[in-house]
Amino acid sequence: MRDDEILIGTLLEDSWLTLEQAASACAVEPTWLLRHIEEGLFPHAESLAGTWRISSIGLVRARRMRALEREFDAVPELAALMADLLEEMDALRLRLRSAGLE
């Protein structure tokens, strides 16, 4: 798959992807994801019986981090910080919508 191709789809909130599936969806090598997981940059990943899996929320985070690293040449820690801030903004916007204020 080329970098300029877009994957369109919807994951359920409680869906999980294998490391390989998530890497494919983000157009990165599984080693990229594994390195970031081992550095503690993906709180939405867990290992079951030695197999890593990533939640749908983690997939969104991985795509954001990949874009930040590529487009702005950001180091992984900075990309993770920006992903944290973007996730917080998403949560605040959701709260505003739920309260009818947006």
Image (tube, rainbow, N blue to C red):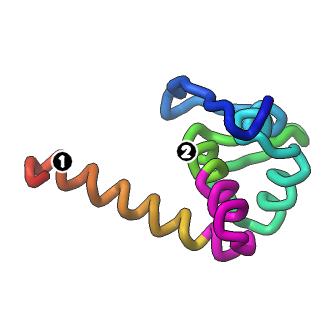
The x, y position of residue 7, in whole percent, is 62, 28
Residue 51 placement, left or right of 72: right
Of the residues shown, which amino acid type is indicated by label 1? Arg
Q: Is residue 53 visible?
A: no
Residue 71 placement, left or right of 18: left
Q: Quadrant of the N terminus?
A: top right
Q: Is residue 78 magenta?
A: yes
> Where does label 1 land, which residue?
97
Residue appearing at x 35%, y 56% in the figure:
91
**In front of the other: 48 or 1:** 1
What secondary structure predominates along the stretch shown in magenta?
helix
> Where does label 2 land, which residue?
57
In terms of secondary structure, where does tag 1 sit? Answer: helix
Q: Of label 1 and label 2, which has the lower sequence position? A: 2
**How many C-alpha atoms fall within 10 Å of the one at disc 1: few (<14), some, or many (≥20)?**
few
Residue 8 placement, left or right of 26: left
**How many C-alpha atoms fall within 10 Å of the one at disc 2: few (<14), some, or many (≥20)?**
some
Number of callouts: 2
Q: Which residues are magenta?
A: 64-80
Q: CA distance from mark 1 to mark 2?
A: 19 Å
